[in-house]
Image (tube, helix red, strand yellow):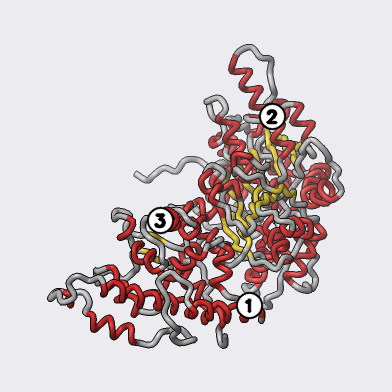
Amino acid sequence: MTGNPSLAHLLGRVGVVEERIRLLVAARRAEDPQPDDPFRGLYLSDEAVDRLLGEASPSPDGDGPEADPGGTSPRQLHCEQLADAAQADGHRLRLRELASAFRLLPLDIDLLLVALAADLDPRFEQLFGYLNDDVTRHRPSAAVALALCGTPLSAADGRARLLSGPLITGGLLVVEDPDRPLPGRALRVPDRVVGHLLGDDTPEPALQAVLAEPPAVSWGDAAPLARALGAGVLLAYLREPATGSGRVLAMGALRSRGCEAVLLDLTRLAAEREPLQLVELAVREARLRSAGLVAGPLAAVADRPAVLEALHAEPQPVLLIGDASWDPAWATRAPLLVEVPVSTTAERSSLWREALGPLNGVDVQAATSAFRLRPEQVARAAGSAQVQATLTADGRITASHLGAGARAENGSALDRLARRVEPVVGWDDLVLPDAVLLALQEVALRARHREKVLGDWAMRPGAGRGHGVAALFAGDSGTGKTMSAEVVARELGLDLYVVDLATVVDKYVGETEKNLERIFTAAAGVNGVLLFDEADAVFGRRSEVKDAHDRYANIESAYLLQRMETFDGLAILATNLRANIDEAFTRRLDVVVDFPLPDAAHRSVLWDRCLGRTLQRAPDIDLAFLGQAFELAGGAIRSAAVTGAYLAADDGGTVTMAHLVTAVQREYRKLGRLTLESEFGPYWGMLATPRRSDR
């Protein structure tokens, strides 16, 4: 065979089908009781049939001697001999590969070729119309196909091949018109199968929507899995940790075996209307291409047993990816269980540098160590960082671009359960005692290096403990707890997620725990800082059990104690009432930060910071007096500064001492405090009085 041996072999076998059609047409004519039927021309005349049969065959080898329908003709023998020679020379023959992958018998191959003929040569449409005795039916019926294969309709095996044989279960053949009796049903080969036999490997359009791109990264040791595949393992479950990648490992193992991969995204699949049909298409795609099927995450379809059972592509391997323990209910077959290793901080830093190339002046490890990403996520995040850098004039990648790229990998699940805050304040915006600042810096330090200390160095072994960091911010309202959490998040390059307790606490038993579990689960896949404001509402002390309410409240606290230990992220609990936090929670906290009320010197600095640099100030502003006279927390000072700015906006645009003492008076009123002349001193007379309209 010359040119394309695979196509030549296919067309040669279709030529054998034409040969059989000639014999069947001759037999039908001989048995026709009304050869001179005046209505014969309404569907097809004998002369037209003669003309069609007289046209040249598409076979590259020309015509051969005729044989009985279903028999092995010299032409077929000659075609297969040429195919043997082509295979011996190392050529791929797609028809033979398909027969091997789907375990087709000779009868299956013949039926497939009969159904395929009209897709390769339009002459067969009219010929099948003649044989069907209905010119409107251009595809072979089951009766015609079996006759061309030399199999009687009464043969149980022949009928079974069209009802439940490998052609049907493998998606290679569709038997249409289910309301008709089987002999009259039309046979059709799906376009994807036709395209594959002709040399096209483009997947079905519907399937492409749920296929994932292969990760452009190499990581981990795939040799053990590759050995298992070489030993004949056809089903494996790769359980991956938060920073490991079962997909990359599976791709590496298949590549080392010289095998392609079909990557099925089960999250996208679960969102489709007909997921089972798409799984069947994916399985067929893997078998057509002699590829391994890699599917994950398994949790997306864990509640759909029919979908899981359909992930069966023998003789091709199926590699399932997930983060939970294997459930025997997921499949009737026992899989090979593979624990995917975690990626180390050094490995991830190497992947960042490999994807980005040399970066001048950027410490990649310092800029990315706080992010827990899988290897393929690192590659995508690096690409996102390069795109973000195009916004700058020189196009240079900075640490902020790396952070933005990493945050782009965050899912949206937590956005529906907590309020996302993009940090905009830094260390310079905090006015706190040195001891508090040191404690906050320790929180950031622990979060940045937790993977190295808790992961690489295993400093918190056993009991399924997570790689998280938990901190308690305790202090009166307005002392800077939320702002400090924002500063820590910005220092780490992470987003801040503030949990709304209204979406957590539920009066029904067990619902609060479910809500918290949803938050912790969503947070596990997000590189962010989780802030529980007013945390004593859910992390409160356990009490003596006096009634059923106490018992369930204690169960809720016990659940939280366990969940905090297994959490892998950065959680900050903020409370005004530290004494209400259960001691067991305190023991599990990494850092406790007590926020005191500011002293006079700090209050003066807070007034200065809160007034900012844009608002114009009058010369009479006495910051020292404001700090000394009014014992306010930072939040109250900020609120008073904003009120003073509003008063200034209505009075010429320059803030004066009168505006500020009036703002303090309004703040005192909000707090329920008395306004005493002794506190306001020489500025008492500046307090604003209500305006009276002229009469």
377 is higher (above) or lower (below) than 622 = below
Rounded to the nearest angstrom, the CA distance separating label 2 from label 3 is: 84 Å
Q: CA distance from mark 3 to mark 1?
A: 34 Å
**Considering only vertical position in the picture, is 591 above or below 493?**
above
Q: Nearer the viewer, mark 2 or mark 3?
A: 3
Left or right of 458: which side holds 203? left
For badge 2, the amino acid type reads: Leu
* Structural distance between the alpha carbons of marks 2 and 1: 80 Å
- Name the residue beneath numbered marker 1: 87
Q: Name which residue type carries label 1.
A: Gln
Q: Position of residue 479 (x, y in %)?
A: 69, 40
Horizontal and vertical percent position of residue 214: 63, 65
Answer with mark 2 or mark 3, whichever residue precedes in sequence: 3
Local packing at callout 3 (Cα closer than 10 Å; few below 14, some 14-19, many 20+) is few
- Kindly state the secondary structure of the residue where label 3 is placed: loop
Name the residue tied to disc 2.
Answer: 577
First in sequence, mark 2 or 1: give its number. Answer: 1
* Mark 3: amino acid: Ala
Q: Nearer the viewer, residue 634 or 217?
A: 217
